Image (spheres, helix red, strand yellow):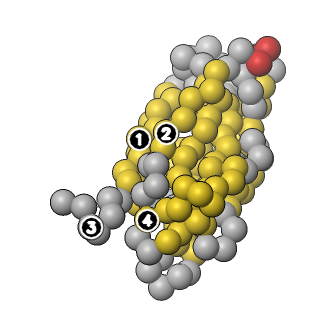
Amino acid sequence: MIGLVVHLDRSVIYGEYVTGVQAIWLTPRATYVRGKLLGTTGKTKSEIQARSGYAVSMIQFIRDKERYYGFSLSFMKIVGDKLDERNEYTSPHVGGKGPGHEGFDRYVTARDYPIYGWELHFGAASDLPDAKRWLNGIKIYAARGLDEK
């Protein structure tokens, strides 16, 4: 995974929140491919993509107990089939920070292994009848180095 396209919607009560996410993948042939949109399109979208030669090592997010509001990504340099933690940088945050900035920071990390897949879970916005479904769960799959058993 080398980036994300984050779809966002806005609520008067909750501010910006994530309605859908599309991963950007680096293929073995060094081409970029956008994955399927998980969730729904939002009123706006932002793209976060790694510099050439880097891949996503960590996804930081702002959330509360019910929804995700925004993301930033950490990237590490690709070295063989692993990531070099000595060469790391973080993207700017995209999306909201929760109502009254009450959201809290969390992250999922692959440490120094490339992310090769993920699952996203969406919930109905029962407190926002006209709103789209919001992101409320993330799981990642990381590739282990070829030298590991």
Between discs 2 and 4, the one toward the N terminus: 4
**Element on which disc 4 rests:** strand
- Tell me which amino acid carries mark 3: Asp
Task: Please say if the residues under marks 1 and 3 sit with CB atoms less than 8 Å apart.
Answer: no
Q: Name the residue: 35% across, 59% down.
A: 143
Q: Is residue 93 visible?
A: yes
* Mark sitting on residue 149: none
Select label 1 or label 3 by which is in front: 3
| Residue beneath disc 4 | 82
Left or right: residue 29 versus residue 68 is left
| Residue beneath disc 3 | 147
Using the numbered discs, state the Cα–Cα distance from disc 2 to disc 4 in whole angstroms.
Answer: 17 Å
Q: Is residue 37 visible?
A: no
Between discs 3 and 2, the one toward the N terminus: 2
Tell me where residue 44 appears, x and y as whole percent: 77, 47
Q: Quadrant of the C terminus?
A: bottom left
Task: Please say if the residues under marks 3 and 2 sit with CB atoms less than 8 Å apart.
Answer: no
Task: Please say if the residues under marks 1 and 2 sit with CB atoms less than 8 Å apart.
Answer: yes
Select label 2 or label 4 by which is in front: 4
Q: Name the residue: 63% across, 60% down.
A: 87
- Tell me which corner region of the image, top left, top right, bottom left or bottom right, holds residue 147: bottom left
| Residue beneath disc 1 | 139
**Element on which disc 2 rests:** strand
| Residue beneath disc 2 | 108
Residue 68 vs 42, above or below: the answer is: above
